[in-house]
Amino acid sequence: MAFNVDLGSHSPDNLVVGGVIQTAEVVVEGAADLVRGSVLGQITASKNYQIAVEGAGDGSETPVVILGQDVTLSAGNDAVATVYLTGQFDAASVTADASLDDGELWAALSARGIFLKTVAS
């Protein structure tokens, strides 16, 4: 019986603070690589996800999930990635597009069970 099994590596960060964490596997699209903690919206037509940007006009302008892993979208290819559907997250560790108003971002995410918290260092 082998007890020395390589389980990979884990680099903890401050993104997840607590709460009831629910995740899902979704298709992410876009023209640039994305980092864990990015705020995504869902495109109405394709049901895929991309960075939530105010005024996008395709449904993705509404923040709905937080990306759970770094995603490489080289050459415009889509990727399957884990997203957080619910939970509490460190606001300073979340990456949102500059076009999103903080108040509207917090309201949209909290309506879906995603709560941004200010965490003392």
Image (cartoon, rainbow, N blue to C red):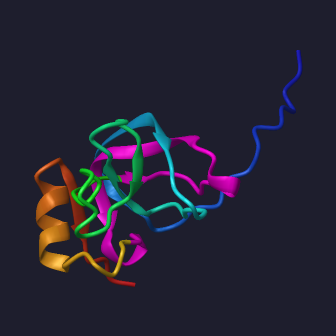
Tell me the magenta residue range.
66-95
Looking at the image, which residue is at 63% across and 46% down?
Answer: 77
Q: Quadrant of residue 33?
A: bottom right
Whether residue 78 is visible, yes or no, is yes
Q: Position of residue 86 (x, y in %)?
A: 27, 46
Looking at the image, which residue is at 41% across and 72% down?
Answer: 95
Q: Position of residue 98 (x, y in %)?
A: 33, 81
* Up-down relation of residue 18 to residue 38 (above or below): above
Q: Position of residue 118 (x, y in %)?
A: 26, 77
Q: Quadrant of the C terminus?
A: bottom left
Determine if the magenta segment contains residue 120: no
* Up-down relation of residue 95 to residue 82 (above or below): below
Q: Position of residue 87 (x, y in %)?
A: 28, 50
Whether residue 72 is visible, yes or no, is no
Determine if the magenta segment contains residue 80: yes
Extreme residue toward the bottom, this view:
121
Image-based side of 69 in relation to 75, left or right = left
Q: Quadrant of residue 80?
A: top right
Looking at the image, which residue is at 49% across and 46% down?
Answer: 28
Q: Quadrant of the N terminus?
A: top right
Looking at the image, which residue is at 42% across and 45% down?
Answer: 83
Q: Quadrant of residue 8?
A: top right
Q: How many marks?
A: 0
Image-based side of 31 in relation to 39, left or right = right
Image-based side of 48 in relation to 10, left or right = left
User: Which residue is at the front of the view, 41 or 37?
Assistant: 41
